[in-house]
Image (cartoon, rainbow, N blue to C red):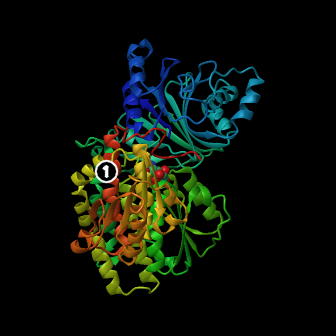
Amino acid sequence: MCGIVGYIGKNNPVEFLLNSIEKLEYRGYDSSGIAVCNKNKINLLKKKGRISVLRNEVKKSQDFNSNFNLEINSGIAHTRWATHGEPSDVNAHPHMSQSGKFAVVHNGIIENYLELKKSLKRRNIKFLSQTDTEVICALIESLYDGQDFFKAVKDTVNLLEGSFALGILCADYPDKLIAVKKDSPIIIGFGEHENYIASDVSAFIDKTKKICRLGECEIAVFDKLDIKFYDFNGKEIKKEIISVDWNIGSSDKKGFEHFMLKEIMEQPEAIRNTIMPRIINNEIKIDNLDKFINSINKIYIVACGSAYHVGAAARYSFEKIAGITTIVDLASEFRYRTPAIDENTLVIITSQSGETADSLAALRESKRRGAKTLAVVNVVGSSIASEADFVIYTWAGLEIAVATTKAYSAQLSVMYLLIIFIAFKNNKITHDSVKKYIQNLIYLPELVTQMLELKSKIYEIAKKYNNSDNVLFIGRGVDYATCREASLKFKEISYSHSEAYAAGELKHGTISLIEPGSLVIAILTDKKLFEKTLSNIREVQARGAKVIGLVSESKAKIADLGLDEIIEIPATSVMMLPSITVIPLQLFAYYFALLKGRDIDKPRNLAKSVTVE
Ligand code: AGP
């Protein structure tokens, strides 16, 4: 996704702006740019490619190296993930209005930009790029009366349809900066003699922990070091400043080669930090849910990507242990269906970023239909967290790698808390059972640690099978759910194809793909389904497949399974198996991609938070 940053303060903005967009690189991008106000002129540079290309241009440019001796300096910068118009210098942000008076950076999509562009062209306004963002800039200029910067912006945003997080400069007001939010996130940071805006807190977490999140359809006007907030009608509003508890350590690799490996290794801590504050005197404590949980007769878990796989894994135990009908759906599908939800439905939206456009839209649709909504998110104060009726934060800490791992595991652990909590509130399990589940849960980080100790073995397996280019992950029940997450991890960072398949479904067509040397990764940890899945393994072996098995059985039983590789999984409750079996498969994906020389933390075409539909 695009990343935007802005600066206003007493210091030279250039270094802060370049360093901040570098901290947003993990969001995925194809070009970058910077604009600063110096005396009553906006200087702008933007380049296709990595930020290092932009840095070189800035170093050579007088405009960015003259001393910034104004009392207050302002600037904006951007990393672009192309939506409208190919990656190029001219399509990169910031965009500038024809007269050079305004510069804009944007994250989101303007859905009515073509009709706006046509009406502006009829007034002889010229455009250089193919982007929707340049239209925003031109519109502001067309509505500017030469006096009121804020009014021109307010009138503009009321004409825009779609999603937009904006940072805006005006050459007439070098000591002002305006930020606007509709559907795409913007965070405000309050520093020492300077203030910041950014798409997410990691851009300035090393500068300040005092933040506030622009709300839906809000405008922030920075005037020197003062800041005022308005709604889109121009009515002034008050905002609360909060402190985030992430330290700078979250945004450095701490000696690991990649953020992804660091975050894989942080999973025991992420699970512990998420569950322990909610286990008090052998009971699960989840604020506010008591009031209505008994009226719930159906649960929807709605999300995208890995967050969706969390629901796919948890569904089995919501039904088996809590005895409640549970439907799991992709947010991008859910919002265009006519889901049978009402006031007795709980819709759980899981999301690491809390900003995924489809998940946010599904949340709004659920509220519109009268459902109770619960957000399970990792980013404090994010849009999904702010708009849901209830929120349970995962305390996984800042997750930088595009491929989620520790947030996925933390979300799973929240599901276990919810399952035990709801089962007990609905008299499906006794207090003794609650205590047993809690003991299992408290021990879960230890089991995850045991899995992490297999990393050398997993590296060797990834090396041995590194020429495989079509991997099939098979399993049944919760094991099938884990296959889906494992397959996504594998694909998104190695660029090699894989597919997750319900083991029992293989013979209905897909088994035709199996040929001598095919690699099949089979998860057979649910003892009740072991024999069934083993028979599916025999079917693929009979056709020449190599099989890596994740097995939770006795040594004796494992010895004569006749699989090519065995990864032993420690026994635990079936509900929590996904948290354990996913670990070796995250490591497998990581090492497989590493051996392929892939850009592991920033895989091609991907973004950490998909804030466009
Ligand atoms: C996971 O590895 C992917 N990067 C992606 O599928 C992600 O899970 C999905 O985009 C949802 O993001 P969210 O959790 O921030 O809503």
Location of residue 499 in the rendering, given as x and y in whole percent from the top left corner: 47, 55
Q: Residue at x 40, y 48 (%)?
A: 403
In the image, taking residue 429 as reference, residue 85 lies left or right, namely right
Determine whether the residue tagged by mark 1 lies in a helix, strand or loop. Answer: helix
- Tell me which amino acid carries mark 1: Glu
In the image, what residue occupies the spot 68% across and 42% down?
Answer: 161
Q: Residues within 10 Å of mark 1 (few under 14, many from 20)?
A: many
Q: Is residue 217 above or below residue 192?
A: below
Q: Quadrant of residue 194?
A: top left
Q: Is residue 511 above or below residue 534?
A: above
Residue highlighted by disc 1:
263
The answer to whether residue 380 is visible is: no
Towards the viewer: 579 or 94: 579
Give the vertical position of 143 relative to 347 (above or below): above
**Residue 516: % across, % down:** 40, 53
Residue in view at x 66 percent, y 44 percent? 233
Residue 280 placed where, x, y %? 30, 75
The residue lying toward the viewer, choosing from 388 and 432, is 432
Q: Quadrant of residue 51?
A: top left
Q: 249 or 152, which is in the foreground?
A: 249
